[in-house]
Every structure is written in structure tokens, then in C-alpha cells.
Amino acid sequence: MAQKKKVAVIGAGVSGLVTAKTFKEKGHDVTVIERSHDLGGVWELSRSYPDVQTQSPKDLYRYTDKAMPDDYPEWPKGPQVHAYLDSYAADYNLRDLIRFNTSVLGMARRSDGAKGWTLSLQEEGGKPKDEDYDFVAVCTGQFSEKNILTHPGQEAFETQGGKVMHSSEYTDPSIVEGKDVTVLGFSKSATDIAVNAVKSGAKSVNIVYLQSVWRVPYFIGGLINFKRILYIRKQEQMFPSWGLNPMQKFAHVIAKPFVWANWRGLEALLSIQLKLKKTGLKPDIKIEDEINCSVPIVTPGLFDMIADGRIKAIKGTFKEYEGDSVVLTGGERVKTDIAIQAVGWKLGVPFLPDEYQEKLVEEDGQYRLYRIIANPDLPDMGFVGFNSSFCTVLCADLAANWLVRYADGKLDKQPTAAEMNNNIEMMLNWKRNEKPSAKVYGGLCVAPYHFKHFDELLDDMGAKKRHRNPIAENLAPPNADAYREFLNSTPDYKVS
Ligand SMILES: Cc1cc2nc3c(=O)[nH]c(=O)nc-3n(C[C@H](O)[C@H](O)[C@H](O)COP(=O)(O)OP(=O)(O)OC[C@H]3O[C@@H](n4cnc5c(N)ncnc54)[C@H](O)[C@@H]3O)c2cc1C
């Protein structure tokens, strides 16, 4: 029988909450360590920029055992997601487990020879102190360490009244009223902020980007919710995946012309709908080579605003600040009062000791994680939510369920260290040589292979039920309620 463990869950976002709930349900003694004053991670209210909403439809951005409220819109707003997470925490009494305002500064293997880790924890305003845990679940996400860029001349720019901020600090739209705003970056947060700045009365809004990327509108062709096209198993199967046998590879060769036509059709449709030719923003890359976690959903109004000049999109990047302007690499000077850097976040687990960092991350930045959850050379720990996607809540739920069974030696297919390492090598090889777009975010992205990833996790867990009826399974998006049923069909156990 598996033994009860003292478990530390680091982070109280989407992933930390479901991990705490899942380990607690099996009987473990769980503590959640959260450096912020509230739960929610990226959805914590003081971190959210105005108008933020999910990219995923609400039935795809939910836990398997809790639907979002019926009166939520199809793409809930940030505060609604936060309220949903808060209510999930209330349902399972998770708040009592969370130590807020407490950061994990470091971790080391326990010196008493016992399994597990000693965490160095610091409460806000307090001194660091050590605590021992038998197992550590890292749920710190991909958006915890801001990527901050500095450019020559920034100090003088700020001294003369200019303001430079990270996108996550843009929480009060009134600051842009009557101002010249320059946004650096072309991700979803960059475009959300640019559109919001226009709506909030900015005098001018520029968006500076290196490369145009394909974006998906909430409704393709203005009519069809993108989940009905891009989230279905049949569409996913058009992408050659890892571990195919010769017959499957042959099937991909035969289907190639049809698949090619499918993607060209989608590109043509998007080009017309989003005015990509008119704005000069048609990407150079083929859409099927780009679909992964970095493909953003179109901020409503973005392309209209670019087309009519309310937002000026300029190719290039910041070179330096000069006086009251930003100078771009193309030489253009852009008068700026507020420069907003929407340049994302730094991936990493900064509190992990160097000798373990080397085991976790390859020189080219690719993560060594079996099923994007665990590494045999990092014992007594695992990662939840690192398997990011277009439906990260569901991914985190399944990963938490996998991880607790892995920690307890209760996976139906409990892998050996050699099996894990072989699989990690196979996946690294596939990403590096066959599917370079899968290397995005250190290889920590399961999109567009949601179904295949979920199939593997359920198979490892010994789920007796894994599929809906063939029509739903092939032609409808993943269904969180169905995944609850599949999880319920795995062998149950409790720790002693
Ligand atoms: C604006 C925005 C919109 C998004 N929309 C979608 C969407 O529609 N669909 C989708 O699938 N994904 C979306 N995402 C991705 C999103 O990150 C995930 O969906 C999910 O919220 C990640 O949750 P998480 O718990 O893994 O990480 P986070 O939400 O980042 O939570 C990590 C937590 O760990 C804490 N932490 C970090 N380091 C430490 C430390 N050293 N000590 C203690 N605590 C620590 C942080 O304070 C934070 O609370 C969006 C992201 C953003 C930023």
C-alpha cells in the first residue's frame, strides 16, 4: 500500500489547485506554497490587464469535475476565471492548505538521508527557513518570471517623463488617455493591450513586431467557433505525430495532398477575414508549421484598427530610447509617452539547484520531462501545468492525476527510469528533427496533440474507458465531463 507523504505544492494557480486537491483526495498531507497574496496565478486580479479573457472556450478551460457557470460567456473574462478558481478552491477546502505570501527560494535533497527535499521558504518580510517534504509538485507555470528588456537611453527617457512597463503591469487603462503608446511584441497580450489603449483614449498606438504570425479568430469565417475546427481529433490527426508505425507514416504520405489543401483553404479564409493582405500582415510561414501554444487568438477589433490606422503596426524592434522617442532597428523614431513591453516571461525553475537544472533542461533549452510531467533523475518531484496547451486546465487536471499515481507507484504502466529516459530521448529527437515547431516554450506544449497526450496519460493510469462514441470522439472537441468518467475508470486507491 502506498504511504502517506508530506507534499509541497509550489504555486496556487490553475495547476497548483488541482494538484493540491488530487493529492489530498488520495490521503496525502498537502501544503501549497504561494508567493502572491491570493490564488489564481495568471488570473490573480492584481496581475490581470484590463479586458483580459480566455483564449479557450469555457468548456475547454475547466476542471473535469467543475463546469464554469452557465451564465459565463463562451470566453470568460479574467475576473470570472478568478471567481471560478476561487469557487473550486472553496468546493475542496483548498484555501486552508495555502500559505500565501510565501516564496520558495531554493531546494536541496534532504540531509537526513530520507527521500524528498528540503525547501527554503520565505514569508514576506520574514527570514528564510527550511522545511522538509517527501514529495514536491512544481506548479509555477510559464508566466512567473517577467522577461524584462532594457535598451540604451532608457534612464534618460524615464527622467524626461517617459514610462516603461512590462505588459503585466498594465492594469490601469486610464494611464494611456491622451498619451502616445508604443507596445513591443505581437503576442495576444500585446494585441489585447494595443486594442485596449485605443479604446481607452490613447493619442496614438504603435505596435512593434518582429514577425507576423497566424492568428485564429474566435469565429472562423465569422461563423464557426474555432473549437469545432481546430480542437477535434480528426484535425489533430492531420499532423504527423511522434511514435508512428510505418503504416501510419504511409497513411500520412497518401493524405498529404488533401491535408495540404485543407491548410491552404484555411489560410485563404483567414487572409480574407482578417484583411491580412491589405495590412501586409500575412505571415511567411505555412499555418500547419506554426500551430502550437504560441498561436494567438485574434483580439477582437485588432485588424480593423490596423487597417484604419488607429493602430500602427511597425516591423522591427526597439534599438534605443532617444529623448521622448523610441528608435527602432529600422531607424524609425516613434514619439512615445508609455512603452509597454509585451515580451513575455522567462521559462524556468529558478529555485532548483544547478546540478538538477542540468538534468531538467538541455543546452538548447528543451525540457527533459516524461509525459511533460516527471524526470527520473529528479526524484520525489514532478511538474503540473508544464504540459501547456489550448486547454491547460484539463491538461493540469490530467497531469495531477498522473503525478499522484506516479508518486505513489500506482500507475498501471509505472515506467522504469530507463523507459522514461528512452521516451524523453525519442521525444527530443522528434522535436528537433521532425517537428521543430514543437520545440516552442522548451518543448512544453502539447498543442496540437491534445488527444494523443491525453490518450497516453489515461493509458498509463489504466483507464478502462478512454473514448466517447466514435462521432463525438473524432469530430467534437475534448469534453471535460467525459475525461472525469475516464479518470473514474482508473483503479482507485488511498494511501495509508
Ligand atoms: C493573459 C493570459 C491568458 C491565458 N489564456 C489561456 C487560455 O485561454 N487557455 C489556456 O489554455 N491557457 C491560457 N493561458 C495560459 C495560462 O498560463 C494557463 O492556462 C494557466 O493559467 C497556468 O496555470 P499554472 O497554475 O500552471 O501557472 P500560473 O497561473 O502562472 O501560476 C503559478 C503560480 O506559482 C506561483 N509561484 C511561482 N514561483 C513561485 C515561488 N518560487 N514560490 C511560491 N510561489 C511561486 C505564482 O505566484 C503563481 O501563482 C493564459 C495566460 C495568460 C497570461
Image (tube, rainbow, N blue to C red):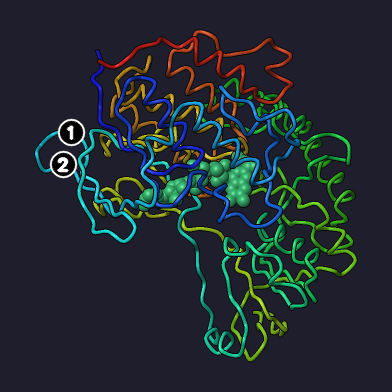
Q: Is mark 1 within 8 Å of ligand 1?
A: no
Image quarter for residue 158? bottom right
Q: Residue at x 68, y 51 (%)?
A: 52
Image quarter of the N terminus: top left
Q: Residue at x 72, y 71 (%)?
A: 315
In terms of depth relative to the viewer, which is nearer, 182 or 35? 35
Query: What label does residue 398 carry, if any?
Result: none
Q: Is mark 2 within 8 Å of ligand 1?
A: no
Q: Is residue 329 above or below residue 98?
A: below
Q: Secondary structure at mark 2?
A: loop
In terms of depth relative to the viewer, which is nearer, 131 or 439? 131
> What x and y, as percent, mark residue 445?
54, 41
Q: Is residue 268 above or below residue 179?
A: above
In terms of depth relative to the viewer, which is nearer, 356 or 260? 356
Amino acid on which disc 2 is placed:
Arg
Q: Which residue is mark 2?
A: 110
Mark 2, other Cα within 10 Å: few <14 / some 14–19 / many ≥20: some
Q: Mark 1 or 2 closer to N-term?
A: 2
Query: Gap in Å between the C-alphas at discs 1 and 2?
Result: 7 Å
In terms of depth relative to the viewer, which is nearer, 94 or 461? 94
Amino acid on which disc 1 is placed:
Lys
> What x and y, as percent, mark residue 80?
65, 41
Is residue 175 visible in the rendered image? The answer is yes
Left/right of residue 117 with respect to residue 268 in the rendered view? left
Q: Residue at x 63, y 61 (%)?
A: 171
Left/right of residue 47 with respect to residue 2 in the rendered view? right
Q: Which residue is mark 1?
A: 115
Is residue 437 visible in the rendered image? The answer is no
Q: Are marks 1 and 2 in contact (CB under 8 Å)?
A: yes
Q: Residue at x 76, y 37 (%)?
A: 260
